[in-house]
Amino acid sequence: MSTNRFTPEKFHDFTIVDDNGKFVGHIRVKPSGILWAPSNSKKWYGVSLDTFAKFMEDNGRRQEK
């Protein structure tokens, strides 16, 4: 007998809008990296998680939880 199960998601998409609600682009988070697609674009730009982590450590502001 087979057992039904949920399959894990392969990515999470987020829509980015500005202060006026105007569409800016999409961010896609995957286990292997981060992708960005600007508004009205069919092309995605991506970096590996290692590259993203290095960028954030070098350029990001430390946040308190």
Image (spheres, rainbow, N blue to C red):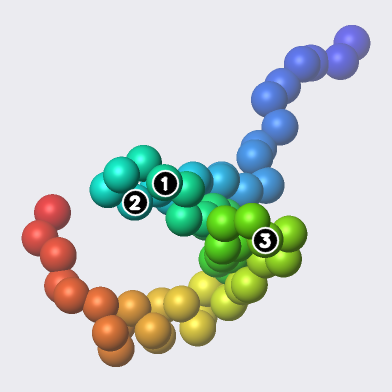
The numbered mark, 1 or 3, whose residue comes first in the sequence reads 1
Please tell me which residue is depicted at 56% across the width and 45% down the height of the picture.
Answer: 12
Q: Is residue 20 left or right of residue 2?
A: left
Outermost bottom residue: 58
The answer to whether 28 is drawn above or below residue 7 in the figure is: below
At label 2, counting other C-alpha atoms closer than 10 Å, the crowd grade (few under 14, some 14-19, many 20 or more) is few
Residue occupied by mark 3: 41
* Residue at left offset 77%, top offset 16%: 4
* Amino acid on which the number 1 mark rests in the picture: Lys
Q: Earlier in the sequence, mark 2 or mark 3?
A: 2
Of the 4 image quadrants, the one containing the C terminus is bottom left
| Residue 38 position (above or below residue 22) | below
Rounded to the nearest angstrom, the CA distance separating label 1 from label 3 is 15 Å
Three-letter residue code for mark 3: Ser
Quadrant of the image containing the N terminus: top right
Q: Are marks 2 and 1 in contact (CB under 8 Å)?
A: yes
- Bin the neighbour count of mark 3 within 10 Å (Cα to Cα): few under 14, some 14-19, many 20 and up: few
Is disc 2 placed on a helix, strand or loop? Answer: loop
- State the residue position of label 2: 18
Classify 18 as above or below 58.
above
Tell me the tag on residue 22. Answer: 1
Name the amino acid, label 2: Asp
For the residues labelled 2 and 3, the Cα–Cα distance comes to: 17 Å
Q: How many numbered marks, from 0 up? A: 3
Which circle marks residue 4 in the picture? none
Give left or right: position of 62 versus 13: left
Q: Nearer the viewer, residue 6 or 43?
A: 43
- Left or right of residue 58, residue 9 in this image: right
Element under label 1? loop
Quadrant of residue 9 within the rendered picture: top right
